[in-house]
Amino acid sequence: METISDFVELGQRIRHVRLVVGVSQDELAAVIGVDRTAVSRIESGGRKVSAVDLVRIAARLGVTLADLVTRPDPVALAARSPLPEDPIGSEQNRGRAELELDAAWRDLQQLRSAGLLGPVDFPYGRPFGSKDEARSLARDVRRHLRLGEDPIGFVSDLAADLGLWCRTTSLKIDGLSMTPEPGLGVCLIYEGLEPGRRRMTVAHEIGHHVSGDTYEPPEHYTSPSEAESRIQAFAAELLLPAAVTSSKSRPSREELITVATTYRVSWSVVVQTARATGCDLSGIDTEDRPRRDEFLRVVGAEPQPDMLPPGLPRAWVRACARAQAKEIITPRRAREMSMGLTADEGAVP
């Protein structure tokens, strides 16, 4: 990623981040000891900003220097909507998520430059023209990873096997990803989602990643709802192959509960998949979601949650630890990149 060297572009970046975090020009002016008009000139590129003032600005905005001086990926930047002077909460939330996504991409590039992570070879960029094509792509992904019809373990590990590096965020954005180049991307998942929905959201972002539509606007499809239905079809097939339920012509409620637990998907996904494969569910109250006592009675355990914060794939944490052990990055930087999972000091095996 490139460093911003032009004061006009730097000023635009400062303005963008200031609007995202909700700081006024007057508040920023107070931090660096100038009046508001001076901040306005900085943001327009008419006034240079010193390194000392830049550090103070970053601290007041609650971001790193890299957030201010590193140019975001050009393709991702072009796909983002500019912020108005008085952004609403949802616009600021999205902007904050984009800052986090850019930081994740910078982390990935650092590990890549160290030779510890890199692009994954897979036939990316195959958009789905229908739900059937979406399901077909999900089956191709499973074949590529030699999963067959087996349950998926940690979904963030599976995403990493496809070059999509996920992590959780406290920002309420469900999921957000970008794939600047085939086989290499980053993804954020809202940590407050229900466990089954967290897995489904990762599967959604994998669909965007492998189909190559990460940056496509809703108009890429006939309508946003059509886009959602195709991504939903991909995600459901990826997490729970239709072949699992197609062999059960008239499954019992207990059988479906077992499937939900084994494949760690929501009750609604199990029911939708069973219906789509022609299962007769007339004898089951599909609206009544299984409760904890029912899971315990049927399989002896509830579905295990996935993508628990920080939700990083194991290969990412291992790469951070190896970079630290090789003294490519400091222990503090390793801990920052691994979101607190590596040791504070000393080599990590």
Image: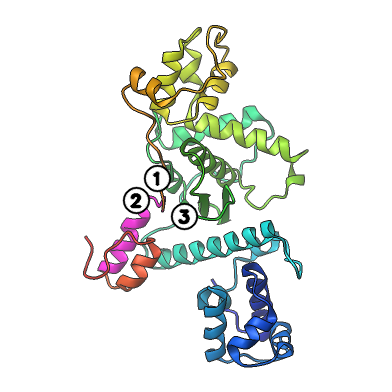
* Amino acid type for the residue under numbered disc 3: Pro
Residue 44 placed where, x, y %?
Answer: 74, 83
Residue 222 placed where, x, y %?
Answer: 78, 38
- Measure the alpha-carbon separation of dots 3 and 2: 17 Å
Lower position in the chain sequence, tag 1 or tag 2: 1
**For the point 69% across and 34% down, which residue is it?**
129
Give the overall secondary structure of the magenta segment: helix
**For the point 43% across and 41% down, which residue is it?**
155
- Measure the alpha-carbon separation of dots 1 and 2: 7 Å
Q: Disc 2 marks which residue?
A: 314
* Amino acid type for the residue under numbered disc 1: Asp
Q: Disc 1 marks which residue?
A: 157
Which of the two marks, 3 or 2, is nearer to us in this view? 2
Residue 168 placed where, x, y %?
Answer: 47, 52
Q: Nearer the viewer, residue 66 or 197?
A: 197
Q: What quarter of the picture does the N terminus occupy?
A: bottom right
Which of the two marks, 1 or 3, is nearer to us in this view? 1
Q: What quarter of the picture does the C terminus occupy?
A: bottom left
Q: Label 3: how many residues lie within 10 Å, few (<14), some (14-19) or many (20+)?
A: some
- Marks 1/2 in contact by CB < 8 Å: the verdict is yes
**The magenta stretch spans residue 78:** no
- Measure the alpha-carbon separation of dots 1 and 3: 15 Å
Q: Secondary structure at mark 3?
A: loop
Q: Which residues are magenta?
A: 310-325
* Amino acid type for the residue under numbered disc 2: Arg
Lower position in the chain sequence, tag 3 or tag 2: 3
Q: Disc 3 marks which residue?
A: 119
**For the point 49% across and 25% down, which residue is it?**
241
